[in-house]
Amino acid sequence: MGVVVVVSDARDGGTNDGSGPARRALPDHAMRRREHLLPFGIVAATETKCLVIGFQVLCSNNIPYFGSSPYSPRILDIFYDNLSFLIADVHKLDDFHSSASKPCHSPTNNSSSKVGPPFSICPGNQNMIFYDCEEPPTQAERQRRGLVDTACGNRTLVGVAKRPDVPGSYFMEGCNATVMPMLARSGEVNPANYKEFISEGFLLTCRHHRLTSSQLESRATTIA
């Protein structure tokens, strides 16, 4: 049974290698100060009363997830100074394995479908494009787009969009395209490493403003 946590502004275990905003370790306990709940709220589990502010964070087997769905992306890291964080849509890795209910296939839902206000996908990410095609594309088309086969065979392919990428350019005749963000990389990117890119995640930002203590009190909600 999953337990519920609130991500806190932990001071221990933080790192800053100079490449980005200071990182804070994910806690194993809930913060008692309400100011530290933003932009997250608590999912009711054993408690009957809790604050509902911002967004829910579910913890299952000591792993925090962005939201309360079993298929929510995993939270890898949080940058508290600018309210952005790193998440990975790791459940998409299951798509590349055959099961009794569904054969091996490319992801079918854009990762953006799991993100809504006040969160947004950072424009600095690159995009992976997964294709599920009725027939294998020609070799010329594969080379032109820089596509490689996925583990599912030569009708399911993946490429990495060059930056700046144009969303409309993802269309390919006879194929369904699914877009998934990934951390930006310099130089040539080998799309054959798509599983690694999925696991390493992508950046989100939150435009939630900080509330005062009185505002926090007014937004406290009792969950029956």
Image (cartoon, grey):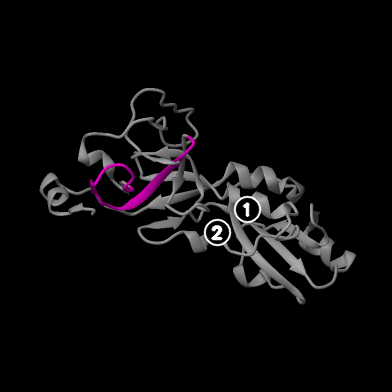
Question: Between 8 and 166, which is closer to the camera in this rendering?
Answer: 8
At horizontal 84% and vertical 71% (from top left) the residue drawn is: 135
Tell me the quarter of the image containing the C terminus: bottom left
Asked if the magenta segment contains residue 55, the reply would be yes
Provide the secondary structure element on which disc 1 rests: helix
Disc 1 designates what residue? 92
Query: Where does the image place residue 112, in percent across and percent down from the top left?
Result: 51, 61
Query: Where does the image place residue 210, in percent across and percent down from the top left?
Result: 23, 48
Would you identify the image quadrant in which residue 131 lies?
Answer: bottom right
Answer left or right for 162 relative to 214: right
- Above/below status of 1 relative to 12: below
| Residue 111: assigned label | 2
Asked if the magenta segment contains residue 166, the reply would be no
Question: Between 186 and 219, which is closer to the camera in this rendering?
Answer: 219
Amino acid tagged 2: Ser
Query: Where does the image place residue 3, in percent across and percent down from the top left?
Result: 40, 39
Q: Are marks 1 and 2 in contact (CB under 8 Å)?
A: yes
Query: Which region of the structure is painted magenta?
Result: 43-61
